[in-house]
Image (spheres, grey):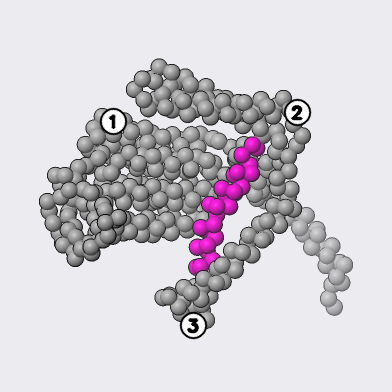
Amino acid sequence: MGVPPLERSREWGRAGAAAPRRRGRVTPPVPRSRRTRGLHPGAWWLWALSLGVAASRTTNPLLLALLVAVTGYVVAACRSRTQGSRSYSAFARLALAVLLVRLAFTVLLGSPIPGSHTLVTLPEVPLPHWAQGIRLGGRVTAEALAFALYDGLRIATLLICVGAANALADPARLLKSLPGALYELGVAVVVALTFAPNLIADVQRLRAARRLRGRPDSGVRGLLQVGLPVLEGALERSVALAAAMDARGYGRSADVPDRIRRTTAALTLGGLLGVCVGTYGLLSAEGGGYGLPLLLAGVVAALAGLRLGGRRSLRTRYRPDAWDARAWLVSGSGGAVAGLLALAAARDPDALQPGVVPLVAPTLPLWPAAAVLLGLLPALVVPKEPS
């Protein structure tokens, strides 16, 4: 006969109690709220915009290519597999299109840059007298193409820097870090920044669905048949966003005394005026004495006005992002690149602005190139965020 179930459970209980228990302590899983969070999104934007400032100080194609390589390496090393991380490749393609359009305009419409090395002579279209200064076709010189190439590369590098910021920084997290006075403006900016990543994701999803159904997803016909669902999805997303903002009380404000409102307006306007006058003083030769004090006073007054203006915003922050030592290192590396290239442009403008008349091959200046390599610091101090 078998053992009754009650006796069997008692035997099992006694056997389990007699068995030696494993020593040690089992570590409980770390809750999601205590896991290491990514870098502050404002640090990524400061780093990317600083590299964009550095790109605006030079037309040397070697330095611009080095800046593009730095942004690409950092994005590949630090970005996570999120929806916005795929925007870097889209901005790179946009930058290539801008470069090609700039070169095409130079070939078709000509350039004011004089040159003696003629590459090709296109048939010129005669224009009426009211279109003086504009020509279609004609002589295309190597000097004009080199100037257009340098200028287009600078614009393309600026676009790639913005694409790196979109790929590395989450716009929703950036919105939480804004002051309360800039919340409404920040929402509009975040919606504008997330338009391109959402559009790219919709196009990729629809093209994959068409390929699974055996339908064409490329060419003019494929693009036309994909465009209507993408437009419909954008409209549905806009309606859902408007409903969500209305349900969360977007635009409401608290009652603030009149004296605080007047003080906020005076501090903000006075601070902005001080920033403008101080910046003009720093850029002009005569305002070196008063430019920096006025700029610092304007920044302090504007920050105080934003601090007081934040009292009108009735919102709380859940798990705000902390500005830690890594954020200082990342933003500081970008600022160092911008500052050193601005110094190099002031001391040795010929190295950072290579001439095209006469046409010479650009050279890579050593210490500006080493300054650009400081932008690789985020790839060393920031771990890749989890997917």
**Mark 2 against mark 1, which lies toward the viewer?**
2
Q: Please give the residue where the numbered disc 1 appears in the rendered image.
A: 346
Residue at image position (26%, 53%) is 132
Residue 263 appears left or right of 296: right
Quarter of the image that includes the N terminus: bottom right
Residue 216 against residue 85 in the figure, above or below: below
**Amino acid type, callout 2:** Pro
Q: Nearer the viewer, mark 3 or mark 1?
A: 1
Front one among 268 and 52: 268
Whether 250 is among the magenta residues is no
Snapshot quadrant of residue 88: bottom left
Amino acid beneath label 1: Ala
Q: CA distance from mark 3 to mark 1?
A: 59 Å
The residue pinned by badge 2 equals 257
Q: Nearer the viewer, residue 328 or 362?
A: 362
Mark 3 or mark 1: which comes first in sequence?
3
Question: Crowdedness of circle 3 by 10 Å Cα count: few (<14), some, many (20+)?
Answer: few
Question: Magenta residues?
Answer: 180-204
Classify 10 Å Cα crowding around label 1: few (below 14), some (14-19), many (20 and above): few
Residue at image position (51%, 73%) is 226
| Disc 2 to disc 3, C-alpha distance | 65 Å
Q: Nearer the viewer, residue 51 or 7?
A: 51
The quadrant of the rendering that contains the C terminus is bottom right
Q: Give the image location of residue 249, x and y in percent.
A: 74, 48
Q: Which residue is mark 3?
A: 214
